[in-house]
């Protein structure tokens, strides 16, 4: 297993971690989940360090999750919210980022509607770490990591849980084409040896899946559900369901929604995951979202611990003052 | 021609191999008063003549670029006619066709006259491609006859394709009476959508909206059908896909009046270059996979493709600070095109020069058969637009030393074979030993 000091300087995509890096994140997450249960859920690990969230897209959930994670590690947090309108006007991302780095920030956590911006930012700055909090349709690595953590927890946790990924059948359903979550999930599950099946109408699949580490592609959800161990649903943005990619949200629900009828086809131990925000009644029926098999709330609370682990692994061992005790 | 004659001095190009459309031979070339005076072996150096040493080099008709964005007027921070033509001279070009997507666009006689006026002292001939439609908006025909009367021979809405088949048909019919050629940027907007790179394995992995090869192919097929029906000439700009090349191959076999160009980046780079999200690799049409690169090269080899054109597209440095999908497309080309052709294309130098000089000169209507002085034979009496090329010299591309106002070359650090040594424009040595003279 990779030791902490080999952990990558940036987290731009799941591929930066590899299976060892993923395992390390999940292992460290265990400690931070435990911390979260304490009366005072705060540790001094990143005291004296400063992280900045730089969100060019509205996402209260992810931003608050990162900021909570950083604060629980005793880091100072600066929060930059940049209206996406000014981005569209071509305001220089580089100027913004270089200004932030000049303030002595240790990590920049960036969310941007354009794919690849965290990669570009990592190329512009000299010292800060860059953490991708979701870029365009490209990746959302910490979301995939928290999915893995949630699954591992449900599979018994620890090394036993890790081993079970190798025999896991994962079905990812929905708008894979436009989904950064799906790209990170595919890479993450595949890194741990799970067999991933993508389920979507052809219009919502990526134009090419050449080189994707997946087992299969299917357009028929009913065929895939009975053998699935994990069903991961993606949000269908309403603009995708307005006739260009699928005729209507109703027709999408009919063909791909996880309805009560379909949930009944699942094995009892099958996990249902959704990265949120859920559109109840479209990709998932309300009664299914509330089933015990649906680990949606668990995902949210694990999110803080996973992000603590990522921040700790990236910053905890850097040459700066402050304790790295967990 | 009303351009000032700066070519008072006599010069002699000695020790080179002369290559033109008739073949190659060892010969010196004497130039005086803007014209070629003498061509032959072992010529006596005329008194007071400037000697351009050409040992080990090839003396060619000056190169002719069918496709340059000189950005003036409107985007002078990216390029001007002065800096663009200086880059052209250093790249061996003695003529460039300026694309009409300036601001204001070149869709009126005044706008075209302004460019000609700005180019009066340039170090290369600046021809103009006029817009097909007013404002390049694809709705109404531009005053093509007025522009043709000023000498405009090519028309295009480059940067965008004419989306309406009906309007394109009318434009082709109308152009026929003017002796003009329409040039198409083939991109069906409904298929291209907001695509920022080639739609395929790389775009899918990188999460960048893709522009399918189909967007180009569909318009090539449509315009070939229109050429068949109208009988009008059509020139296809910067073809980049295997199916497009094949369509042109078939159209030529059927005897249709079509010609085609390709850009150096489409035979030297692939869409894998985009992996690091650097906007310097964003072009339109986008970089394609290797199979398309191979098809472009095959099209050059078998004569399907008539010309290599730069699609020189300067951008001020801020473009690189934009996210990939928001950055403007385009790369510099004038100073690297010849070297890339020599480096990447496995054809005899004579064929490469045909693709860079006399064939594009004919398409642009700038050759002697159209009354112009570009791409002609190197023979006494001809206008002296020449370049001297060292075909074996190697050099490494350094963006900071390029003459363009912009720095957006995707070839930084790349070592290329073949270098321009001298360029003579209308008798004036505008480049000597790789140095621009003004």
Image: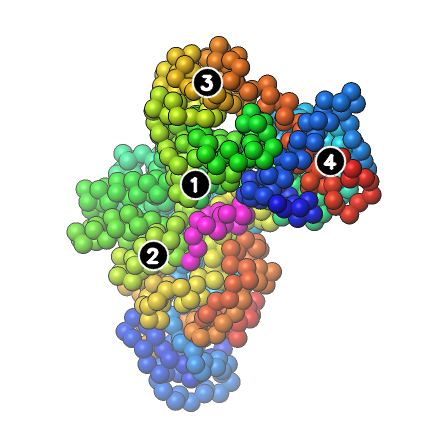
Q: Which residue is at a point 35% across and 71% down the rendered structure image?
A: B349
Label 3 close to label 2 by CB (< 8 Å)? no
The disc, 1 or 3, on the residue closer to the chain's N-terminal end is 1
Which chain does tag 2 point to? B
Which chain does tag 3 point to? A
Residue indicated by mark 2: B294
Q: Which residue is at a point 60% across and 60% down the rendered structure image?
A: B400
Looking at the picture, the colour scheme in use is rainbow
Question: Distance between the Cα atoms at labels 3 and 4?
Answer: 42 Å
Question: Closer to the camera: disc 4 or disc 2?
Answer: 4
Q: Relative to A169, is A313 above or below?
A: below
The disc, 3 or 4, on the residue closer to the chain's N-terminal end is 4
Q: Which mark is residue A268?
A: 3
Q: Residues within 10 Å of mark 2 (few under 14, many from 20)?
A: some
Please state if B333 lies on the left or on the right of B251 as rendered: right
Residue indicated by mark 4: A51
Question: Distance between the Cα atoms at labels 1 and 2?
Answer: 25 Å
Residue indicated by mark 1: A212
What is the x, y in percent for residue A287? 48, 10
User: Helix, strand, or loop for circle 1?
Assistant: loop
Magenta segment, prevailing SS (helix, strand or loop): helix
Give A16 or B322, whichever is nearer the viewer.
A16
Question: Closer to the camera: disc 3 or disc 4?
Answer: 3
Visible residue check, residue A256 = yes
User: Helix, strand, or loop for circle 3?
Assistant: loop
Magenta range: B268-283
Question: Closer to the camera: disc 1 or disc 3?
Answer: 3
């Amino acid at each position: 297993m990779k030791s902490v000091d080999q952990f990558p300087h940036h987290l731009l995509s799941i591929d930066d971690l590899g299976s060892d890096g993923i395992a390390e994140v999940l292992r460290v997450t265990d400690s931070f989940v435990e911390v979260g249960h304490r009366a005072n859920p705060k540790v001094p690990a990143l005291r004296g360090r400063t992280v900045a969230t730089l969100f060019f897209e509205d996402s209260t959930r992810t931003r608050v999750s990162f900021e909570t994670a950083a604060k629980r590690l005793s880091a100072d947090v600066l929060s930059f919210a940049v209206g996406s309108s000014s981005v569209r006007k071509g305001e220089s991302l580089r100027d913004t980022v270089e200004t932030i780095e000049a303030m002595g920030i240790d990590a920049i956590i960036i969310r941007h509607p354009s794919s690849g911006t965290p990669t570009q930012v990592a190329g512009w700055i000299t010292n800060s770490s860059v953490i991708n909090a979701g870029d365009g349709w490209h990746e959302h690595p910490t979301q995939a990591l928290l999915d893995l953590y949630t699954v591992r927890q449900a599979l018994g946790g620890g090394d036993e849980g890790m081993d079970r990924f190798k025999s896991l059948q994962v079905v990812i359903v929905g708008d894979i084409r436009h989904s950064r979550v799906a790209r990170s999930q595919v890479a993450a599950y595949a890194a741990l040896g799970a067999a991933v099946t993508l389920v979507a109408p052809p219009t919502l699949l990526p134009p090419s899946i050449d080189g994707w580490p997946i087992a299969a592609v299917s357009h028929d959800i009913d065929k895939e559900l009975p053998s699935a161990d994990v069903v991961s649903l993606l949000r269908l943005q309403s603009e995708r369901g307005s006739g260009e990619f699928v005729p209507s949200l109703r027709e999408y629900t009919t063909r791909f929604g996880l309805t009560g009828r379909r949930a009944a086809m699942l094995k009892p131990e099958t996990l249902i995951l959704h990265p949120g925000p859920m559109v109840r009644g479209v990709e998932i029926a309300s009664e299914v979202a509330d089933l015990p098999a649906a680990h949606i709330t668990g995902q949210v609370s694990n999110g803080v611990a996973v992000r603590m682990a990522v921040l700790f692994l990236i910053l905890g061992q850097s040459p700066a003052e402050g304790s790295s005790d967990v | 021609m009303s351009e000032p004659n700066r070519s008072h001095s006599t010069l002699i190009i000695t020790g080179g191999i002369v290559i033109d459309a008739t073949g190659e031979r060892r010969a010196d070339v004497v130039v005086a008063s803007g014209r070629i005076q003498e061509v032959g072996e072992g010529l006596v150096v005329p008194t007071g003549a400037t000697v351009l040493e050409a040992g080990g080099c090839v003396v060619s008709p000056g190169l002719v670029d069918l496709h340059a964005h000189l950005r003036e007027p409107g985007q002078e921070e990216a390029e001007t006619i002065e800096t663009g033509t200086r880059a052209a001279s250093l790249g061996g070009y003695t003529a460039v066709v300026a694309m009409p997507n300036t601001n204001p666009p070149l869709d009126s006689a005044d706008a075209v006259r302004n460019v000609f006026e700005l180019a009066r002292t340039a170090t290369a001939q600046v021809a103009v491609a006029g817009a097909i439609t007013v404002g390049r908006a694809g709705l109404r025909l531009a005053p093509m006859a007025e522009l043709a009367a000023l000498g405009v021979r090519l028309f295009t809405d480059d940067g965008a394709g004419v989306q309406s088949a009906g309007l394109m048909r009318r434009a082709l019919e109308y152009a026929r009476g003017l002796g003009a050629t329409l040039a198409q940027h083939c991109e069906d907007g409904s298929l291209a959508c907001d695509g920022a790179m080639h739609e395929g394995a790389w775009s899918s992995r990188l999460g960048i909206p893709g522009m399918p090869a189909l967007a180009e192919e569909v318009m090539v097929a449509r315009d070939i059908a229109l050429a068949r029906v109208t009988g009008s000439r059509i020139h296809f700009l910067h073809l980049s896909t295997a199916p497009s090349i094949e369509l042109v191959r078939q159209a030529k076999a059927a005897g249709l009046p079509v010609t085609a160009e390709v850009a150096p980046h489409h035979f030297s780079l692939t869409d894998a270059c985009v992996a690091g999200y650097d906007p310097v690799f964003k072009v339109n049409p986008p970089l394609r996979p290797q199979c398309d690169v191979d098809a472009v090269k095959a099209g050059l080899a078998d004569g399907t493709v008539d010309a290599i054109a730069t699609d020189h597209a300067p951008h001020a440095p801020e473009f690189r600070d934009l996210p990939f999908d928001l950055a403007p497309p385009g790369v510099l080309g004038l100073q690297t095109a010849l070297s890339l052709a020599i480096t990447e294309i496995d054809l005899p130098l004579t064929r490469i020069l045909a693709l860079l000089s006399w064939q594009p000169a004919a398409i642009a209507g700038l050759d002697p058969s159209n009354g112009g002085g570009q791409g002609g034979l190197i023979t006494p009496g001809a206008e002296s637009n020449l370049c001297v090329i060292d075909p074996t010299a190697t050099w490494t591309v350094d963006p900071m030393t390029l003459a363009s106002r912009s720095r957006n070359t995707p070839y930084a650090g790349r070592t290329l074979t073949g270098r321009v040594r001298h360029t003579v424009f209308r008798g004036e040595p505008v480049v000597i030993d790789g140095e621009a003279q003004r």
